[in-house]
Amino acid sequence: MPQCTAPSRGHKTASGRENCPACRYGARYGGYSGGGSSSYGSRSYTSSGPSSGSGSGSSGSTRRSAKPRWSRSGSSVFYTPTEVETLTPFRETVEQQPPAPAPDVRDLFLCHAWNDRQVAAKELYDLLLARKVSVWFSEVDLGLGTLMLREIDKGLAKSRMGIVLVTPAFLERVQKEGSVSDKELSALLRRNKLIPILHNTTYEALENVSPMLASRTGLSTGEDQTMADVADKISELFAP
């Protein structure tokens, strides 16, 4: 009988469960049913290229063999089945919204730690902007002399959904009650339209700080996925 790899590797990255020979099928994870029996998975992607592999020895591109139904023909972006399952509800939200939202409406609100504003958060913002995704980003949208919390409130209200960049700096900041990151995260969690993006940290570390956020599946950098890969997948959610 296959042995579960959770004690040594964990299951809470986008690809972690795909590596586990015991748990890759049928487990429930992050609020959506996993494995091939999922109603999201069965209708939203098809296998393309190598299969997901068998056992913990498979890695890299052999696991990224799923293509969601919204991915354009000829797209070079590949996903794990778990990532497709995770992103499908967000794509359905986009599809239910008007095709041409108001000019001041953004696709995404980017929640991040203050210390990440000129490094990781700026990198993600630039990558998304280059892919025609409109993003509310405090470094750009908070003008001099404006009331910060009021402007953030407006940004939250006028964003179709949110992403939260979870880094070691974010985990440190969100533990401080009353921090701006903490307020943004609370608002985004209530809307149930939030995609966590883990960068240089783990879901285990996040769970120690915010079990509610850790219960949501998302995307992560590391292993065989870069920040540019994450931006590609987010941008495809908003493709016509």
Image (spheres, rainbow, N blue to C red):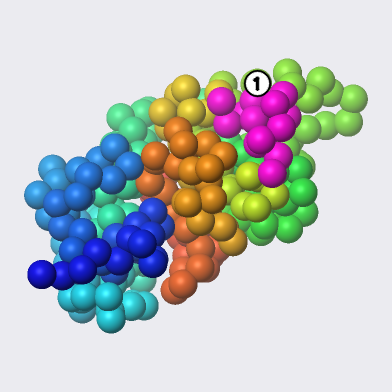
Can residue 197 be seen here? The reply is no
Percent x, y of residue 140: 75, 41
Q: Residue at x 59, y 61 (%)?
A: 200
Camera-nearest residue between 57 and 75: 57
Q: Is residue 8 magenta?
A: no
Q: Which segment did they paint magenta?
A: 172-186
Main SS, magenta region, reads: helix
Q: Residue at x 37, y 28 (%)?
A: 98
- Whether residue 178 sits left or right of residue 24 in the image: it is right
- Outermost residue on the right side: it is 145
- Whether residue 103 sits left or right of residue 214 in the image: it is right
- Whether residue 211 sits left or right of residue 26 in the image: it is right
Q: Which residue is mark 1?
A: 153
Camera-nearest residue between 138 and 205: 205
Which amino acid type is shown beneath numbered disc 1?
Answer: Asp
Q: Give the image quarter of residue 92.
A: top left
Mark 1: give few (<14), some (14-19) or many (20+) Cα within 10 Å. Answer: few
Q: Indicate the secondary structure of the residue bearing disc 1.
A: helix
Percent x, y of residue 204: 48, 51
Q: Residue at x 90, y 25 (%)?
A: 145
- Answer above or below: position of 171 versus 236: above
Camera-nearest residue between 181 and 19: 19
Percent x, y of residue 52: 21, 71
Q: Give the image quarter of residue 176.
A: top right
Q: Residue at x 55, y 23 (%)?
A: 187
Q: Is residue 174 magenta?
A: yes
Q: Give the image quarter of residue 199.
A: bottom right
Percent x, y of residue 54: 18, 75
Quadrant holding the N terminus: bottom left
